Image: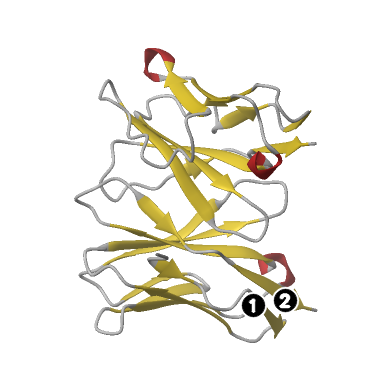
Amino acid sequence: DQQVKQNSPSLSVQEGRISILNCDYTNSMFDYFLWYKKYPAEGPTFLISISSIKDKNEDGRFTVFLNKSAKHLSLHIVPSQPGDSAVYFCAALDSGTYKYIFGTGTRLKVLA
Amino acid sequence: GAGVSQSPSNKVTEKGKDVELRCDPISGHTALYWYRQSLGQGLEFLIYFQGNSAPDKSGLPSDRFSAERTGGSVSTLTIQRTQQEDSAVYLCASSLPSGQETQYFGPGTRLLVL
């Protein structure tokens, strides 16, 4: 029972264009969502988060959108840079618990 | 320390041997998590420690897996009688007490069971 799904295992984007990474969830109790970036041989690093009381959060080139009715969130990176090439994980939390549920990741490749 | 550290960074062992993986969380972080990432998979929750409370072991895949956290700081994940399917990257993360807190991950231990 996968509660958090990233259906695209990989994505390639040209440098300077927009990267859109998607994530779907099934548990309506999730109220906090995060995106992590992971380079090879390193642990995931926090990128951006959003609470369920918002539908958008922006931090520089990174914006996360949350559509609660569709149980869908997305990460937009614009403009994409080669250094953004990494695996991106979305994670969800029911704040009444402490258990973060992670998706399987999307490998982003930004082509120079 | 500056971040979460884990040791060893890589471990190769023979099937049937026991292994111990260590995690040093960020000072002051009372919450500590262990995850496993198998090839092509997401992060699988294993165990959670919060302060002096009893740990949540609900993610441990079998009774060959156990973990301790001494003094509310360093944690050790032990896998007994390792199997080839235990091969994965084992990640540790720490955070302030849970409740929409960011987790900070260590670099992971890459375990290969031959």
Instruction: Tell me which residue sits at (25%, 46%) in the image.
Output: B99
Residue most extreme to the top: B71
Quarter that holds the N terminus of chain A: bottom left
Subunit that carries the residue with mark 1: A
Residue B73 is tagged as none
Q: Residues within 10 Å of mark 1 (few under 14, many from 20)?
A: many
Give the vertical position of B66 relative to A93 (above or below): above
Image x and y of residue A56, in percent: 33, 76
Amino acid bearing label 1: Ser
Give the vertical position of B1 relative to A16 (above or below): above
Q: Residues within 10 Å of mark 2 (few under 14, many from 20)?
A: many
Which is in the foreground here, disc 2 or disc 1? 2
Instruction: Tell me which residue sits at (57%, 80%) in the image.
Output: A78
Amino acid bearing label 2: Val
Q: Which residue is mark 2?
A: A110
- Secondary structure under tag 2 reads strand
- Asked if labels 1 and 2 touch by Cβ distance under 8 angstroms, the answer is yes
Give the vertical position of B10 relative to B89 (above or below): above
State how far apart marks 2 and 1 are (Cα): 7 Å
Image x and y of residue B104, in percent: 48, 42
The foreground one among A86 and B59 is B59
Subunit that carries the residue with mark 2: A
Q: Which residue is mark 1?
A: A80
Quarter that holds the C terminus of chain A: bottom right
Q: Earlier in the sequence, mark 2 or mark 1?
A: 1
Image x and y of residue B29, in percent: 38, 30
